[in-house]
Image (cartoon, grey):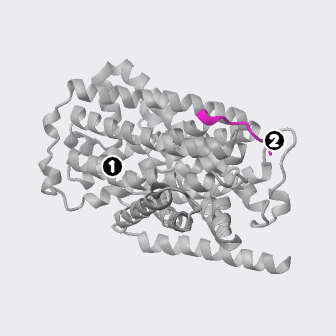
Amino acid sequence: MKKNEYGLFTAIGMIVGIVIGSGIFFKSDNILVATNGSISLGVLVFCIAALGIIFGSLTISELASRESKAGGIITYAEYSYNESVACAFGWFHTFLYYPTLIAVVSWVSGIYICMLFGIDAGLATHIIIGFVIMIILYVLNVLSGKLGGYFQNASTVIKVIPLILIAIAGVFFGNPSTIKINDVIHMKSTSWIAAIAPIAFSFDGWIITTSIGHEIKDSKKNLPKALVIAPLFILIIYVLYFVGISIYVGPEKIMALGDAHVDLAASMLFGSWGAKIILTFVVISIIGTVNGLIMGHVRMPYSLAIRGMFPNSKKIKLVNDKLGMPLYSSIVAFIISLICLVVHYITQKYNYLPNSDVSEISITVNYMLYVLLYIKVLRMGLEGEVKGIFKGKINPILATIGSIIILSGSLSNPLFIQYLIICGVILLIAVLFWKFKSKEV
């Protein structure tokens, strides 16, 4: 594959662009529902859930500074343990983690595109629009890896605009009395821990930039920098936006309106035409998230194939000379995402996952897998390979605690056990596949 296409800004833009984009816009109502309308509890849970991303990225950056081979998380798992573990990580990301996120965020893009154009549509229309968005972005990334990077940079800048505007509106025109510190002191809501799952979704995606690590200029320096700078920036923007929209629109209205609360906030702030502009920014923001996910996903089968960890590896690892991209890898990634989009449609149509979606549990399982990498960094710290008490000890410990908290927040999901079994089956098949392949060699 072509090397060194992306700079530090693209790496930061990819993290910010994937993480900020959809979750914060359509999960704010879920968070308030879980906290019983308490803004202060919501902020607290944001900070608690942020442990997973901030200290997780600080910990993973230690591995990123040592290994820059194609594959990102596959490479770190291989470096930390062995090929079996690396294969399991790669299969989980290829078949569940990336495609469920792509399916859900593509669907969300359909929802907001309908809002933008005033289309009174249902689930099927939202899914169809999301499918079209998926096709366009997969084609874009296959035709030009650089073009995908440029779009990522542009959408990252655009997506921060509505967040900042709504945060400022809340400060100047909102009702700060709706923030009650006593809600935290007396723990107004006993179900607040359920807010961790939607917040984990809002924060998720930071690891995906490691999938293009081998294509980042001076990767061993720039990727760790991106993994440190971006999460801190995201936490600040998220808390400001959540507080701003909550005190501007009001928790009760947000909970009643669901995803439509963003449209109301924009209309209240700028009138009907101004609202269209804000919604345009939101749509670009969400599409930017889908693009960032696809940038990572098209490379996953390829990254497994170059290690012989994927069926028909010889074909999947081929890179098209003209495009400089692994064409077959991209096609496989698209098919998997399409299947997940169909599964998402079924779960939403028949309400199998109330106040949730197919991506939340795969995100949780992903954080459980990260713990293996955090333990490796902790061991490196204890052995003196990673210098400093924070880098080698405190960061991985807090990252592990953050992952456990995110896990506890997902236990309330009614299909958690069933989905966990599915994840376990994928991981087991991956390990067995590698064991079988390694015996052939």
Residue position marked by numbered label 2 in the rendering: 324
Q: Residue 130: where, in percent of width, then height?
A: 55, 43
User: Is residue 59 one of those drawn in magenta?
Assistant: no
Dominant secondary structure (helix, strand or loop) of the stretch shown in magenta:
loop
Label 1 Cα crowd, 10 Å radius (few <14 / some 14-19 / many 20+): many
Query: Judging from the image, what secondary structure is the residue with disc 2 in?
Result: loop
Side of 425 relative to 403 (left or right): right
Question: In the rendered image of this protein, does residue 176 appear above or below residue 297?
Answer: above
Image point 30% across, 46% down: which residue?
29
Tell me the magenta residue range: 1-9
Q: Residue 145: where, in percent of width, then height?
A: 72, 38
User: Is residue 4 one of those drawn in magenta?
Assistant: yes
Question: In the rendered image of this protein, does residue 425 appear above or below residue 355?
Answer: below
Image point 50% across, 46% down: which residue?
105
Which amino acid type is shown beneath numbered disc 1? Phe
Can residue 400 be seen? yes
Side of 389 relative to 331 (left or right): left
Label 2 Cα crowd, 10 Å radius (few <14 / some 14-19 / many 20+): some
Q: Residue 245: where, in percent of width, then height?
A: 28, 35
Query: Judging from the image, what secondary structure is the residue with disc 1 in?
Result: helix
